[in-house]
């Protein structure tokens, strides 16, 4: 079971996808997980993975600004 415990941030992101502008709004939450849970995307182009925070900068994470938001929360807001 996964429960959202705290709203962290909202991040708007725009990019050019083969000549077509794309726009998304990301809502970022802290969550509490009871037991191990695999998360499956409802969109084929998205992938979810659990990884140590120190590895977040080694993957193709988009939008890039979200990396700092997550790190700031983990290290300063607990």
Image (cartoon, grey):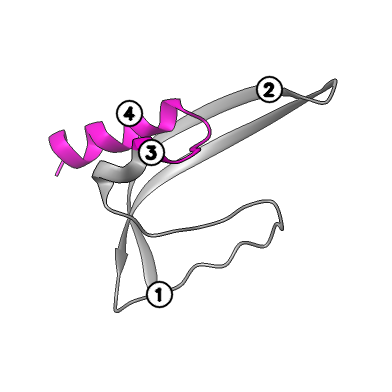
Measure the C-alpha gap from mark 2 to mark 4: 19 Å
Q: Of marks 2 and 3, which one's residue comes earlier in the chain?
A: 2
**Location of residue 22 (image quadrant):** top right
Q: Of marks 1 and 4, which one's residue comes earlier in the chain?
A: 1
Look at the image and tell me in which quarter the C terminus lies: top left
10 is higher (above) or lower (below) than 45: above
Measure the C-alpha gap from mark 3 to mark 1: 23 Å
Measure the C-alpha gap from mark 2 to mark 3: 21 Å
Task: Sort mark 3 into few (<14), some (14-19) or many (20+) by Cα contacts within 10 Å.
Answer: few
**Location of residue 59 (image quadrant):** top left
Residue that protrudes farthest toward the right in the picture: 19
Measure the C-alpha gap from mark 1 to mark 2: 31 Å
The boundaries of the magenta stretch are 57-78
Q: Of marks 4 and 3, which one's residue comes earlier in the chain?
A: 3
Task: Sort mark 2 into few (<14), some (14-19) or many (20+) by Cα contacts within 10 Å.
Answer: few
- Residue at 32 percent across and 28 percent down: it is 68
Disc 3: which residue: 58
Q: Of marks 2 and 4, which one's residue comes earlier in the chain?
A: 2
Whether residue 8 is visible = no
Look at the image and tell me in which quarter the N terminus lies: bottom left
Disc 4: which residue: 68
Left or right: residue 41 compared with residue 20 = left
Q: Are marks 4 and 3 in contact (CB under 8 Å)?
A: no
Disc 1: which residue: 37
Label 2 secondary element: strand
């Amino acid at each position: 079971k996964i429960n959202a415990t705290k709203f962290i941030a909202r991040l708007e992101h725009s990019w050019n996808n083969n000549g077509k502008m794309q726009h998304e709004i990301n809502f970022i939450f802290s969550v509490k997980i009871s037991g191990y849970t695999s998360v499956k995307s409802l969109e084929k182009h998205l992938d979810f993975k659990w990884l140590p925070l120190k590895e977040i900068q080694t993957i193709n994470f988009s939008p890039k600004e979200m990396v700092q938001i997550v790190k700031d929360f983990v290290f300063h807001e607990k």
